[in-house]
Image: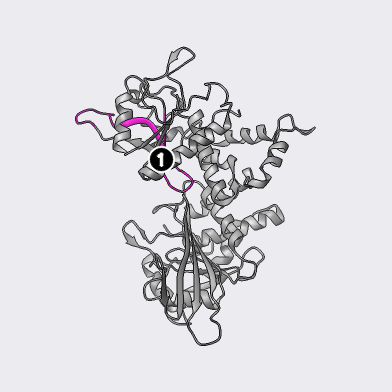
Amino acid sequence: MLLSRSPSGPKKYFPIPVEHLEEEIRIRSADDGKRFREEFNGYKEKNKFIAAQGPKQETVNDFWRMIWEQKSAIIVMLTNLKERKEDKCYQYWPDQGCWTYGNIRVSVEDSIVLVDYTIRKFCIQSQLHDGSKVPRLVTQLHFTSWPDFGVPFTPIGMLKFLKKVKTLNPSHAGPIVVHCSAGVGRTGTFIVIDAILDMMHAEQRVDVFEFVTRIRNQRPQMVQTDMQYSFIYQALLEYYLYGDTELDVSSLEKHLQASHTTTPHLVKTGLEEEFKKLTNVRIMKENMRTGNLPANMKKARVIQIIPYDFNRVILSMKRGQEYTDYINASFIDGYRQKDYFIATQGPLPHTVEDFWRMVWEWKCHTIVMLTEVQEREQEKQSRLVRQFHFHGWPEIGISAEGKGMIDLIAAVQKQQQQTGNHPITVHCSAGAGRTGTFIALSNVLERVKAEGLLDVFQAVKSLRMQRPHMVQTLV
């Protein structure tokens, strides 16, 4: 949907229909008739960004010429190559090795795939005989979690992505090149979030309306839909409420010492305050309709812990039997891969068959069991698995031996490498407390190994947005 008016109050303008954007691009590309881009200021930085359309096959040479001439070191890509089976952007880089685009030679140096984005590093070099053959490093950050319709479900991934862009951009580099498909909707959204976060830091205020108005005067349709405009506010609110909770691993010990102490004006420790903020994660009861059906409520150990409809594990329906596609289980994202885990409760006597159907149908090779068969003299489940059955975790409290849990995670990851990237099934009794802790720790440790960074708060917050009550207690 295109906005019917600009943010500049009652002043009307006639939006460019998406199908006419190409014509507008040709009209406005005075330099070579093919390339469509404009420079934008950040909050204070002049010409911080170049907003561009996603390259087409016939414009890819011009795209790389622009990167070279502008001395850009960062490309931000906010679209996938295909969405809804429709071409959105031409693949303007080689999968491996090198390729020459016009006079620019591009070779792939490295590629890192994460759950929300992919980082690709290119070495580029001009083939012109003008004395400028010194190769340069260009990093592409490709945000892959923007859905085909609407906006991302949560701004957490975008805020992480934006921080990574800022971290990787050298101070001496030219403008950051930002593109989606048409170069207005998602591109404008990204540029506005970056600028207003800088404004928030400098002035302790935000003015989204004014900034969107300003960039629309440069390039019509920047921030194209009301959903994108709303998403900007969601991202700003997320940052305002929780700030930057990311830590370098070298500062972890110091952070923990500070978090366990109280100050005169605070009753709770820093860790308690941080955990309390997790209660702000609203349980979306309107997205639990399937689990709340009477037939399915009988399949829950704890009626408050059931899956959301948008990421529940769906089984094949038994012929002539309603509700047999349901199991109390949720897909959970890993550090590098979406739906890397399945978080589920320990099977009840009448759901054991469903549990094994799930394992078979979703090709799970690994089951992590974090509960005993009996706790508090109550039967929790039949013994279903032997491999990766962690015995050292009491029902109340935490495991006394942290190293045992780390060893378990390492063993599970080794198993995954041998069996392929099918979901890892993780369960305790209700499928939230110990299950959430295991998954959070697994994701945090993966990031520490890859980046030397950790963010326990956002790791747990992200889990709670995927399944209610994940990581239930402070200790």
What residue do we see at 58% from left, 32% from top?
402
Q: Nearer the viewer, residue 264 or 196?
A: 264
Amino acid residing under circle 1: Gln
Residue placed furthest toward the right: 264
Res. 39 image quadrant = bottom right
Res. 218 image quadrant = bottom right
Lateral position of residue 146 relative to residue 272, left or right: left
Residue 446, compared with residue 290, is above or below; it is: below
Lateral position of residue 218 relative to residue 197, left or right: left
Expressed as whole percent of the image width and height from the top left, the position of residue 117 reads 48, 54
What residue do we see at 49% from left, 85% from top?
128
Magenta stretch containing residue 456, yes or no? Answer: no
- Count of numbered tags: 1
Q: Give the quadrant of the N terminus.
A: bottom left
Expressed as whole percent of the image width and height from the top left, the position of residue 309 reads 38, 36
- Does residue 8 appear in the picture of this structure? no
Q: Nearer the viewer, residue 369 or 54?
A: 369
Res. 474 image quadrant = top right
The region drawn magenta spans 318-344
Magenta stretch containing residue 343, yes or no? Answer: yes
Residue placed furthest toward the bottom: 129
Expressed as whole percent of the image width and height from the top left, the position of residue 74 reads 54, 66
Q: Give the quadrant of the C terminus.
A: top right
Expressed as whole percent of the image width and height from the top left, the position of residue 31 reads 48, 82
Circle 1 is placed at which residue position?
415
Say which element carries label 1: helix
Residue 374, compared with residue 150, is above or below; it is: above
- Does residue 171 appear in the picture of this structure? yes
Lateral position of residue 365 relative to residue 168, left or right: left
What residue do we see at 80% from left, 32% from top?
264
- Mark 1 is surrounded, within 10 Å at the Cα level, by few (under 14), some (14 to 19) or many (20 or more) other residues, namely some
